[in-house]
Image (tube, rainbow, N blue to C red):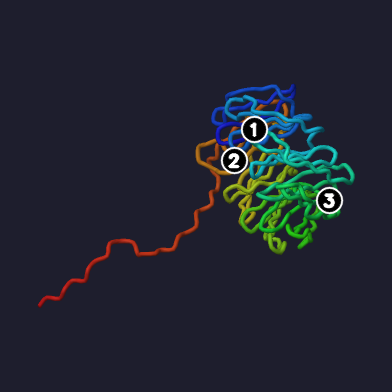
């Protein structure tokens, strides 16, 4: 989802673009994909069965396509005019976003396993099986390769750390520079995923609990039971933590305190179908615009506008001068 459109892969080798404000179809093209498309700078990047496609997001016209060799293992990621793809069974490839030119390609070796990644301005963090690796975005050089009790899933990087969860019920904070584990926290179920906001990292797990930790030392700030089983990493948006679940497409919590805010229940509109996760959430909340998009497995889409959401107050600015108009002291009568 971007500011104006929502992009959805459909069975039958189709990708559709819907107007975000109205839900009307803008265009449809014939490409088969089982992964969420990536939209960046007006271009939609699609990982097909064995190709990478670049599509003009406004018109649906193809800009370029290049072979991937084999099938992708995770959604695409982008940074620094570079598109990164994880390719079965253990490959990583970086492509120039302007024309699809291959910049570098790397085989990670080891056993084939489910994989996920996080890409920032200069680094690629890959979780594959029980391994967490850092690669340089510029040339694919492996900086370090750390083995942790796994399988691992959904790495996310912030403030010099990489946070990654495991099906061993453990959540790890790993130093970005040397790959050393700085702290670990064990929970009561498999880690689904995490998100970061300011100094906190938010973790959802299959014990149906949402937790907030200090990024620096792993101290638990708060925890709260979820109303349903989480099915995707939580998302931090404007002072709110949103979690996609089985029973509710999204449940929201106060990011600072963990107090529950609301559960989205679209049963009146969609009749409680099975939902595709995660619910699409805009990174910037604006009143009276569609902020949440729920997609059901039977091919229906529901756009929601926020009407009672919490918005983080802007920080107060220190007064440089006192308000009002300065008055001159009256002169004493002679």
Judging depth in this view, the residue of 51 and 302 nearest the camera is 51
View extreme (bottom): residue: 334
Left or right: where 21 falls relative to 178: left
* Of the two numbered discs 1 and 2 in the rendering, the one whose residue sits closer to the viewer: 1
Q: Which mark is residue 44?
A: 1
Tell me the residue at 79%/61% (across/down): 180
Percent across and percent down for residue 189 are 81, 51
Tell me the residue at 73%/57% (across/down): 176
In the rendered image, is residue 327 in sight?
A: yes
**How many residues crowd around disc 2 within 10 Å: few (fewer than 14), some, or many (20 or more)?**
some
Q: Are marks 1 and 2 in contact (CB under 8 Å)?
A: no
Left or right: where 107 falls relative to 309: right
Judging depth in this view, the residue of 231 and 182 nearest the camera is 182
Image quadrant of residue 11? Answer: top right
Percent across and percent down for residue 73 are 79, 38
Image quadrant of residue 85? Answer: top right
Would you place residue 200 above or below residue 229 in this image?
below
**How many residues crowd around disc 3 within 10 Å: few (fewer than 14), some, or many (20 or more)?**
many
Image quadrant of residue 42? Answer: top right
Q: Which residue in the structure is indicated by mark 2?
A: 282
Quarter of the picture holding the C terminus: bottom left
Dot 1: what SS? strand
Q: Which residue in the structure is indicated by mark 3?
A: 131
Determine the CA span between mark 1 and mark 2: 17 Å
Determine the CA span between mark 3 and mark 1: 30 Å
Left or right: where 127 falls relative to 280: right
Quarter of the picture holding the N terminus: top right
Tell me the residue at 57%/24% (across/down): 24
């Amino acid at each position: 989802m971007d500011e104006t459109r929502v992009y959805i892969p459909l069975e039958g080798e189709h990708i559709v673009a819907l107007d975000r404000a109205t839900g009307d179809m803008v265009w449809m093209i014939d490409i088969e994909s089982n992964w969420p498309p990536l939209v960046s700078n007006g271009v939609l990047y699609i990982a097909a069965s064995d190709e990478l496609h670049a599509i003009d997001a406004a018109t649906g016209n193809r800009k370029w396509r290049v072979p991937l060799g084999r099938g992708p293992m995770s959604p695409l990621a982008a940074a620094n005019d570079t598109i990164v793809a994880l390719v079965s069974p253990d490959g990583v490839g970086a492509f120039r976003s302007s024309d699809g030119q291959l910049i570098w390609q790397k085989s990670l070796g080891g056993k084939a396993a489910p994989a996920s990644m996080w890409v920032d301005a200069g680094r690629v963090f890959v979780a594959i099986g029980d391994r967490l690796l850092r690669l340089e975005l510029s040339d694919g050089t492996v900086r370090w390769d750390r083995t942790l009790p796994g399988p691992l899933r959904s790495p996310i990087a912030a403030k010099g750390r990489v946070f990654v969860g495991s099906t061993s019920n453990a959540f790890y904070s790993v130093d970005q520079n040397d790959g050393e584990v700085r702290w670990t926290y064990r929970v009561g179920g498999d880690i689904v995923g995490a998100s970061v906001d300011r100094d906190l990292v938010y973790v959802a797990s299959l014990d149906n609990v949402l937790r907030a930790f200090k990024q620096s030392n792993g101290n638990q700030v708060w925890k709260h039971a979820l109303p349903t089983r989480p099915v995707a990493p939580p998302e931090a948006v404007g002072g709110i933590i949103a979690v996609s679940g089985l029973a509710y497409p999204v449940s929201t919590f106060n990011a600072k305190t963990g107090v529950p805010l609301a559960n989205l229940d679209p049963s009146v509109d969609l009749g409680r179908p099975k939902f595709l996760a995660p619910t699409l959430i805009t990174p910037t909340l604006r009143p009276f615009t569609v902020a949440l998009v729920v997609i059901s497995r039977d091919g229906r889409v529901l756009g929601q506008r926020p009407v009672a959401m919490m918005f983080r107050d802007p920080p107060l600015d220190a007064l440089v001068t006192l308000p009002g108009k300065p008055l001159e002291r009256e002169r004493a009568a002679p």
